[in-house]
Amino acid sequence: MRKKCKLLEVSILKKLWQAVVCLLGCLAALPGIAGDMSKPAHFESGKEVEVVSARVGPQGAVLSTGNLGTPVDGIAVEIPAGALNHEVTVKLSYNTGKLSLNHGQPTGVFLRISAEQVTEFRVPIRIRVSYDPSHWKGYVLVGYAIDQKGRLSGVDSGPKDSQAGTASFSTLVPLLFTCVYAPL
């Protein structure tokens, strides 16, 4: 019995250690944390320009920014079935603001996802971003939400396909989204 408890303790400690290492890796990728703390990452908001708008109901939809020559070209937002209780207008806009970092490289993508009278989706929505993986060797693409004070907080990462040059992120809330190339 003691041997089983000891093995269970070791297993739990290994998993805890793996979680700590993973958390430290995530923190190292956060701009403003891995670098000089006296200069945290900050977003200075600019003008918002609507790119696409659609009525979306409980059945869900995929909204795409297309290729219109905007900073958010090639982004798709998937709102899965069940994410909304009723039909609402969902808008994708870009912000002309500027992101100051002391660690990593901004992508220039500042995508506003808004849904009238929705503060939280019932299931996560997915944001799919296109990028050129050959240009960013040695970097990882990290997604962030930008709050009203210009501060960044991480969003959940989804599948990344370096062959196709796509990365996915998910969120439960309408937000101002950006992604950053963080060095490995």
Image (spheres, rainbow, N blue to C red):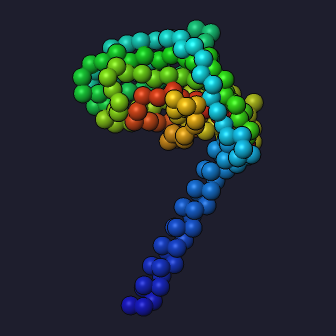
Task: Indicate the quadrant where residue 122 lies.
Answer: top left
Q: Residue furthest top?
A: 68
Q: Residue furthest left?
A: 86
**Residue 73 seen by the camera:** no
Q: Position of residue 40 (x, y in %)?
A: 67, 40
On screen, residue 125 versus residue 159, left or right, reads left
Looking at this view, is 115 or 72 the one in front?
115
Looking at this view, is 136 or 91 the one in front?
91
Please give the name of the residue rendered at 51% of the width and 16% of the height, measured from the top-left corner.
93
Please give the name of the residue rendered at 63% of the width and 25% of the height, measured from the top-left corner.
44
**Residue 156 seen by the camera:** yes
Q: How many marks?
A: 0
Q: Position of residue 170 (x, y in %)?
A: 46, 36
Q: Position of residue 140 (x, y in %)?
A: 66, 40
Q: Residue furthest bottom?
A: 2
On screen, residue 65 versus residue 172, left or right, reads right
Quarter that holds the N terminus: bottom left
Task: Indicate the quadrant where residue 142 lies.
Answer: top right
Please give the name of the residue rendered at 47% of the width and 85% of the height, measured from the top-left corner.
6
58 over 70 or under it: above or below: below
177 over 87 or under it: above or below: below
On screen, residue 18 versus residue 172, left or right, reads right
On screen, residue 135 versus residue 90, left or right, reads right
Q: Position of residue 144 (x, y in %)?
A: 56, 36
Looking at this view, is 177 or 169 the one in front?
177
